[in-house]
Amino acid sequence: MHEFPEGLAARGWTIRFIDFVESRGRRRGVTYASRLHRSEVTLETVPSFGNGIFRRLIAVFIALVWLPIRIARIKPAAVVLYAVPTFGWQTVLACRLLRIPTIYRAIDLSSDIRETAFRRVVAKAEQFVARRSTVSCPNTKALGTHLRQLGATNVSQLFPGFDEQQIVGSTLGYQKTILFMGTLFPFAGLEMFLAAAADKLRASPEVTVRVLGSGAAEDSIRRTIDELSLDSQVTLVGFVPYESLFEEMKDASVAILPFELLPLTHVALPGKVPQYLRAGLPVVSTPLQGLQELLPEGSGVRYREPGTEFVNEVWRLLEDPEERKELVELGTRRLNEVATWDTSLNGFECVVEIAQSLERRRGDAG
């Protein structure tokens, strides 16, 4: 969610980023240098107090008053909205009142991404934002279909960009390492993968699994590793800073995305898969609709049903370095055609222009 603001700032746009901080502390007018585009973005935070869910709930009500005042003072040409339940609907209301175009950059199903007692409330907020934003801009067509079902009328799908990275050469020579990288959501499917792969792992002591990241499913994954007696072959590395990701991935052979097949995972676009390819790793994934829009079968990814079919494909690629290389080349070619940052930022600027035009028409009609 930070690359588009940083990329636009690098193109000369003045960018202010307003966020919500989970813990105590508030940023006001802090300018930071982006990690990717050599640009500067001014960052500030919706004020709140307390901790945990109480802090978020307080921010919901503070934002109802604070955001309209702040937006009126900034007078932006457009507002790009990632937030939904915490202050998304307040932002849409404020921008409607101020006649400022809003662009809802949808990247997942807000109501399903985390288990919460407020799921229905979040779903209502998502529907409100989708219906009343000037333009909804989803990652995938599948997510765009969902937004239209919620009532969005102006939908413009746009892939994010994925710049080529400097691949760090392996120091281990030929190895057989399976890699998963990213947030350990309950739907990540790693427990299912490890259970299906347990016999092959025990029969192949040279094969290892590395998991980069942390999240809600971490304890469950650790229990699965212990129950299957795979401690010597499966390593949970924990959180890895972005700057170190490609160093951590350099000695792997095959990357996996064993996500469960759910509405949430079908409409999203897991950014880790293009990152795998940019690091020189072919991918085996469950057949997710949104991901297949960006990377069709054979373009860097082999899509297999979870279970035995998935595991067998991983082992087949472990034994075939030439096919791994060909998959990466085809996937990289596809990314270069449809999802570089230059292409994506051009598209995003067009979306901003569309939103501004629609808002002007609404103002003229009013």
Image (cartoon, rainbow, N blue to C red):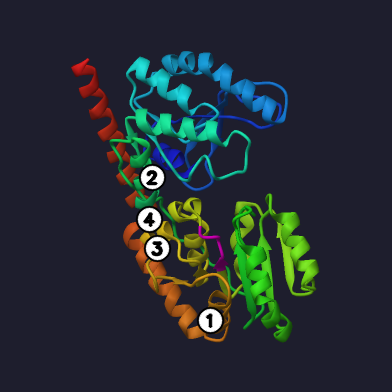
Residue on which disc 1 sits: 317
Task: Please report whichever mark, 4 or 3, sits nearer to the chain's N-terminal start.
Answer: 3
The kind of secondary structure element at disc 2 is helix
For mark 3, what is the residue? 292
Q: Which mark is residue 146?
A: 2
Would you say 206 lies left or right of 324 here?
right
Between tags 1 and 3, which lies in front? Answer: 3
Q: Are marks 2 and 4 in contact (CB under 8 Å)?
A: no
- Depth check, mark 1 against mark 4: the one in front is 1
From the top left corner, tell me how far across and down residue 240 is, in percent. 67, 55
- Sequence-wise, the earlier of marks 1 and 2 is 2
Q: Quadrant of residue 366?
A: top left
Distance from disc 2 to disc 3, alpha carbons, whole Å, reads: 17 Å
Amino acid type for the residue under numbered disc 1: Leu
Magenta-tinted stretch: 256-261
- Total marks shown come to 4
Of labels 2 and 3, earlier in sequence is 2
Distance Cα–Cα, label 4 vs label 3: 17 Å
**Closer mark to the observer between disc 2 and disc 4:** 2
Q: Nearer the viewer, mark 4 or mark 3?
A: 3
Q: Which mark is residue 340?
A: 4
Label annotation for residue 108: none
Q: Where residue 175 sits in the image (x, y, percent)?
A: 64, 81
Q: For residue 260: magenta? A: yes
Is residue 298 at all visible to an observer of this figure? yes
Q: Amino acid at mark 2?
A: His
Q: Which label's residue is closer to the chain start, 1 or 4?
A: 1
